[in-house]
Amino acid sequence: MENSTDKEFLNECKNRIDSSFQRLYHCLDQLDNNQIWWRPNEKMNSIGILITHTCGAFRQWTITIMNNEEDVRDRPEEFINNNKISKQELLQFATKLKSDFITAINNLDPLRLMEQRRIQGYDTTLMSAIFRALTHVEGHIGQIVLLTRIQLGNNYKIFWTPQTDEQRAERKNKH
């Protein structure tokens, strides 16, 4: 039997991916192709690598399972610093992923959330896989924001700033 908690979980999943991708787009809008593929050192990932890896992992852990598709992910390919992929292509890749995820969520029967699945050697439920994938995205988006800020320094445009005392978590009546 479907319940409102399941629907709220799925709605929140859509909100989370939207929020994450807004921050991704915000960073990409400020960068050129060279900056997207820049790495602080040879052992660290570029923003381009983080995008291709995040999209590959997210698709594997969510969309592929929700749509009962064959998993065709090539994880090692995601970690190639391939500056031949343009900023526009990365944006299209991410935008398609977000759209595919929202479509899959909208078409998902909430009763399937407790289905057992095996992904990358892990036994999990569909709900847990979605949750894990969203937190994975959040972590890598944080890295992308940091790499953007490192490169742009004082030229980085802040995504959001608090406008009210409540948003700043300030108390008006301090004793």
Image: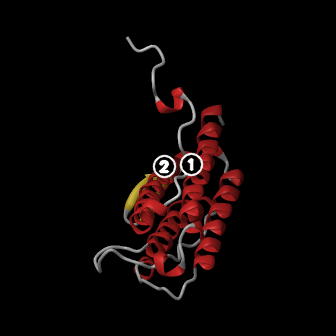
Name the image quarter holding the N terminus. Answer: top right
In the depicted view, which residue is nearer to us: 48 or 32? 32
CA neighbours of label 1 inside 10 A, class few (<14), some (14 to 19), many (20+): some
Q: Position of residue 85 (x, y in %)?
A: 55, 84
Task: Assign a secondary structure to mark 2.
Answer: helix
The foreground one among 167 and 7 is 167
By what rule are the colours in the image chosen? secondary structure
33 sits left or right of 79 in the view = right
Q: Secondary structure at mark 1?
A: helix
Numbered circle sitting on residue 131: 2
Q: Quadrant of the C terminus?
A: top left
> Which is nearer the N-term, disc 1 or disc 2?
1
Residue 115: image location, x then y, percent: 53, 50
Compared with residue 90, is residue 133 higher up or lower down, i.e. above or below? above
Question: Does 125 appear above or below 93?
Answer: above
What separation in Å lies between label 1 and label 2 (alpha carbons)?
Answer: 10 Å
Residue type highlighted by circle 2? Phe
Q: Which mark is residue 169?
A: none
Residue at 37% from the left image edge and 73% from the top image edge = 45
**Residue at the (38%, 59%) spot, across then down:** 122
In this view, the residue farthest toward the front is 154
Q: Is 1 on the left or on the right of 20, as rendered?
A: right
Depth check, front residue: 77 or 116: 77
Measuring from the top left, give residue 140's x and y in whole percent: 43, 61
Residue type pointed to by label 1: Arg
- Which residue is painted at 55% across and 56% down in the image? 23
The residue beneath circle 1 is 16
Q: Nearer the viewer, mark 1 or mark 2?
A: 1
Looking at the picture, tell me which residue is in the foreground, 146 or 97. 146
Crowding at dot 2, Cα within 10 Å, few <14 / some 14-19 / many 20+, comes out as: some
Query: Where does the image place residue 81, in percent across and percent down from the top left?
Result: 42, 83
